[in-house]
Image (cartoon, grey):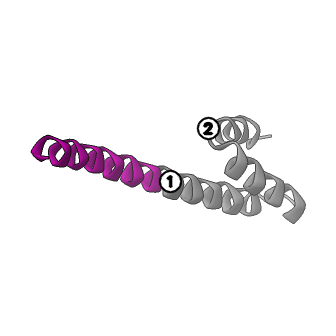
Amino acid sequence: MILSAVMFGSIGLVLGIVIFVSIIVILVNIVTSIWAYRDAQRKGKSKEFALIVLIGTLLFPILGLIVYVIIRND
């Protein structure tokens, strides 16, 4: 009985850490996507292009941001 309580406690801790890290990653993804969208608008790109950048960075966070940073100075 005591062993199961200890195991459940450690599983709960791991689950809590995983949830916390997941929330941080999602928030960073949202913040970087908003930055890319606003940056595209600031650089004089069309609203459609900025919207595509927003959707691309939301769906493909790392790859989308890398591609945008590469093409943003065109």
The part of the chain drawn in magenta is 1-24
Residue 69, quarter of the rendered image? top right
Q: Residue at x 81, y 60 (%)?
A: 51
43 to the left or right of 47: left
**What residue is pinned by disc 1?**
28
User: Mark 2–mark 1 contact, CB under 8 Å?
Assistant: no
Relative vertical location of residue 42 with respect to residue 58 in this rendering, above or below: below
Query: Which of these two is toward me, 12 or 36?
Result: 12
Cα distance in 3D space between marks 2 and 1 = 11 Å
Q: Residue 40's x, y, as percent?
A: 74, 56
Q: Residue at x 69, y 48 (%)?
A: 57
70 to the left or right of 35: right
How would you rate the neighbour count of disc 2 (Cα within 10 Å): few for under 14, some for 14-19, many for 20 or more? few
Q: What's the amino acid at mark 1?
A: Val
Residue 70, quarter of the rendered image? top right
Query: Which of these two is toward me, 46 or 13?
Result: 13
Q: What's the amino acid at mark 2?
A: Ile
Relative vertical location of residue 22 with respect to residue 67 in this rendering, above or below: below
The extreme left residue here reads 2
Q: Residue at x 72, y 42 (%)?
A: 68
Task: Identify the secondary structure beneath mark 2.
Answer: helix
Which mark sits nearer the N-terminus, 2 or 1?
1
Question: In the image, is residue 52 part of the stretch drawn in magenta?
Answer: no
**What residue is pinned by disc 2?**
62
58 to the left or right of 16: right
Question: In the image, is residue 19 part of the stretch drawn in magenta?
Answer: yes
- Overall secondary structure of the magenta stretch? helix
